[in-house]
Amino acid sequence: MVIIIFSLLSGLLFGVGLTVSRMIDPSKVIGFLDVVGSWDPSLAFVMSGALLVTVPAFIIAKKHDKTLFNVNLTLPSKNNIDTPLIIGAVLFGLGWGLGGFCPGPGISALSFGLEKPLIFVSAMTLGMLGFDMFSKKTD
Amino acid sequence: MENFTPVPSLIGGLMIGIAATLLLWTTGRIAGISGILGGLLSRDVSNFNWRLAFIVGLLVGPFVVSEFGAGISPINIDADIPMLIIAGLLVGVGTRMGSGCTSGHGVCGIGRLSIRSIVATFVFMLAGAVCVYVTRHLIGWGS
């Protein structure tokens, strides 16, 4: 139960951070990716601010190996650079540049009650489900 | 650079970092949104509750800013509906295939100094910049 409350708080603070940083606004994201146009470097500050906290946080977490509630860390096990990583990142980047939404801001933007974020998140969910179904079949 | 907002962006970024730390130090999990949403869609019942709680928090975040914070400026989405459908499908497939997005690879993966995530982040930012260059400057959408 404690874990659920902290997950909720973490998601909440994440959503607040996306809103305060304006990462939730697709035109802001496009402005960051538009390096040859009127480039807006703000989102580099979002990434830097986040890394300023997460780099030491991961060093401390790995040193203790367990969380504050004595739960084991569940970290990704893959270390190699493979084709799915690169192709997946290319496809994601193209979609990000096209709509200006990545998954987190897309979900948070649903709270505006607008049609467009809902369409984006629905298509994204469909893409995830489709990929997972296809990749399970070919395994 | 007329829209440059270094201070709110840095503060928001710190909040995102603290949020990822909170999740890591309590649940031991990576705050990767595509992984959390993807996991929620899978049949992994034992991890359903914390993932759902995180997504609910993410949805409520903007309300907290508008109710208790300085209010929210409206967002601008230039892309039309067909473009958003294509964008959504690309983001959905790409993040599952590449095992992460801006949060999982960018904030958390680079945070734990994973070479895999550093490469992925470089590649998706480059692909995003190329996409914006082609659509905004070569084709001329949204200008």
Image (tube, coloured by chain):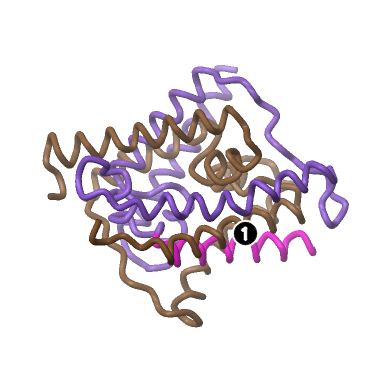
Chain colours: A purple, B brown
Q: Nearer the viewer, residue A104 or A117?
A: A104
**On screen, residue A121 above or below B11:** above
Kindly indicate the quadrant of the structure image that contains residue A124: top left
The image position of residue B49, as x and y in percent, is 70, 56
Does A35 sit left or right of A84 as displayed?
Answer: left
| Residue bearing the label numbered 1 | B19
Q: Nearer the viewer, residue A73 or A45?
A: A45
Query: Dividing the picture into quarters, in which one does residue A1 lie?
Result: bottom right
Q: Quadrant of the N terminus of chain B?
A: bottom left
Q: Is residue A64 left or right of residue B133?
A: right
> What residue lies at 70% left-to-right and 29% top-to-bottom?
A77
Magenta stretch in the rendered image: A1-22
Which residue is at a point 44% across and 32% down the rendered structure image? B122
Kindly report the secondary structure that dominates the magenta region of the rendered protein: helix
Q: Is residue A12 magenta?
A: yes
- Report helix, strand or loop for mark 1: helix
> Is residue A110 something that shows in the picture?
no
Q: Position of residue A37 (x, y in %)?
A: 20, 45
Q: Position of residue A118 (x, y in %)?
A: 37, 56
Q: Label 1 lies in what chain?
A: B
Residue A115 in the image: above or below residue B104: below
Packing grade of label 1 (10 A; few <14, some 14-19, many >=20) is many
Can you say whether B136 is above or below B63 in the image? Answer: above
Q: Identify which residue, B116 or A71, lies in the foreground.
A: B116
Q: Residue at x 47, y 82 (%)?
A: B67
At horizontal 46% and vertical 44% (from top left) the residue drawn is A125
Question: Residue A57, percent across and down?
Answer: 70, 50
